[in-house]
Amino acid sequence: MPPPDTFASATARRWFLGVLFLVSMLNYTDRVIFFMMVDDIKVDLGLSDFEIGLAGGISFALFQTLLGLPLARLAERRSRTTIIAVCTGFWSLMTAACGLATNFAQLMIGRMGVGIGEAAFLPAASSLLGDAFRADRRGGAMSILQLGSPVSAIFAALLTVFVAGTFGWRVAFFVAGLPGLLVMILVWRLREPERGKADGVVEEAVPSLLDVLLALLRRRSFLFVALAALLVTMGMHGISNFLAAYYGRTFGLSTGQAAMMYGFINAFALGCSMMIAGFGMDWAGRLDRRWHAWIPAAGVLLSAIFYAIAFSRDSMVSTGFFVMLGGLTQFFFYVPTLTMVQNMVGPRMRASAIAIISVITGLIGGGAGPALTGVLSDRFAVAAFDHARGAFHAVCPNGVAAEGSSPALVEACTRAAASGLQGAFLVLCGLFALSAVFYFLAAGFVERDAFSAERGNGA
């Protein structure tokens, strides 16, 4: 007989999930709007692709993941809704502060602040959903929570077009930060579900972080899942940080046009992907738990193929179509990965377990991916530039020809910068293919590892 539902009514459950969805949407908006305005920020502050990669990747990811662990431990002991509310207010203020940056160091500090604020959300929210929904419903609930990502892509695109396009990128940061201060109040008023009730157990003792880590390391499926997720997030963040810039450089789109293309393609791809992977995993997992790993394995393998085709095309329509397919199949990994990790441990370990996998995917994948892409892009751009015109970085500072340059030089600089990103993206496709191998290996151990956790043996 399944454990009882945590909420007394379906309406209460929907409101609970709906408020967390709003936080998720703002969480991703504050991240993705930076990517959409990359070239405007780059030119205004005089940055290289590598510096953009640092500001968009490692500065954010370092603090988000490292602070995620202690905040996750706090979430095992204290009110998770209060933690999320406080952090939502803080990251919203720091998003607005990014609009005040006048140099690279200040932009880095602003992005670090956003990372610090967002550090608590995923571990605490995942823990809340783990206690609010039974195991056979968690994939669907996580999918709805993560729909905040595609919705944020549209919201951020609209902000970029109508706010950044009219008033500049600084004002867009200000506007992006304001809604979080209102949603913070809604989160504060949420009632927390009882820990462990959705699993039919109540755990009072809070295991140490070392106990949680050892519990995960004893599960062979976790080792393969962690390696797979690390690789796919490196590729994912590397591409997403520079995709709007790629559209602008390759097809001559303005910042607003590139943002709209980025936003609507990503929204459709991510929205479909989250729902298919999450609810599909719940359904298929009832037949065979190995589908929890087979679904992301198939998805990231297909994404490697679709992305390789997309970034080899000269047509904007063709590129957009295959990017959409690549994004749709790429995100088959996300909800199943979080759900598999949740199902490996007991209720009092879930926030910490999600924080641990987030350190792996966020700090290394989200941090190193954009920086690696920036380094590769700069190197490929230098190689693609017509050296008869001079050295690329001297003739094309920040990847753009100096004001007053001839049309031929402007075109040469733009073409080289576009080729740089194209080469970097094609290299990243190999990471997706390798990730698929590790997900397939994880499938052989998912059933055994999830079974032991559900019997109350979270350690």
Image (cartoon, rainbow, N blue to C red):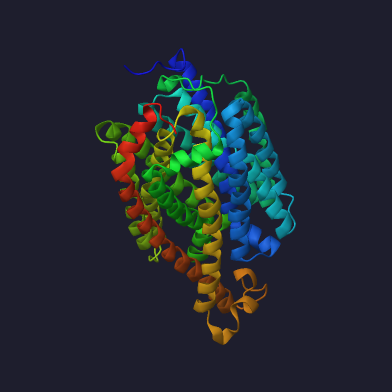
> Can residue 310 be seen in the rendering of this structure?
yes
Judge by depth and name the residue closer to the eye, 173 or 315: 173
Q: Position of residue 448 (x, y in %)?
A: 31, 37
Residue that appears at 46% across and 17% down: 6
> Farthest residue toward the left?
287
> Farthest residue toward the bottom?
388
Judge by depth and name the residue closer to the eye, 123 or 162: 123
Q: Is residue 144 left or right of residue 449?
A: right
Residue that appears at 62% across and 20% down: 189
Residue that appears at 36% across and 32% down: 452
Q: Is residue 250 left or right of residue 293?
A: right
Number of marks drawn: 0
Q: Quadrant of residue 290?
A: top left
> Farthest residue toward the top?
8
Q: Decide: is 250 above or below 183.
A: below
> Can residue 24 be seen in the rendering of this structure?
no
Q: Decide: is 103 above or below 273.
A: below
Q: Position of residue 13 (x, y in %)?
A: 47, 20
Q: Quadrant of residue 26?
A: top right
Residue that appears at 45% across and 57% down: 235
Q: Is residue 384 left or right of residue 327?
A: right
Q: Position of residue 398 (x, y in %)?
A: 63, 69
Q: Quadrant of the C terminus?
A: top left
Q: Position of residue 109 (x, y in %)?
A: 71, 51
Q: Decide: is 105 above or below 194.
A: below
Q: Quadrant of the N terminus?
A: top left
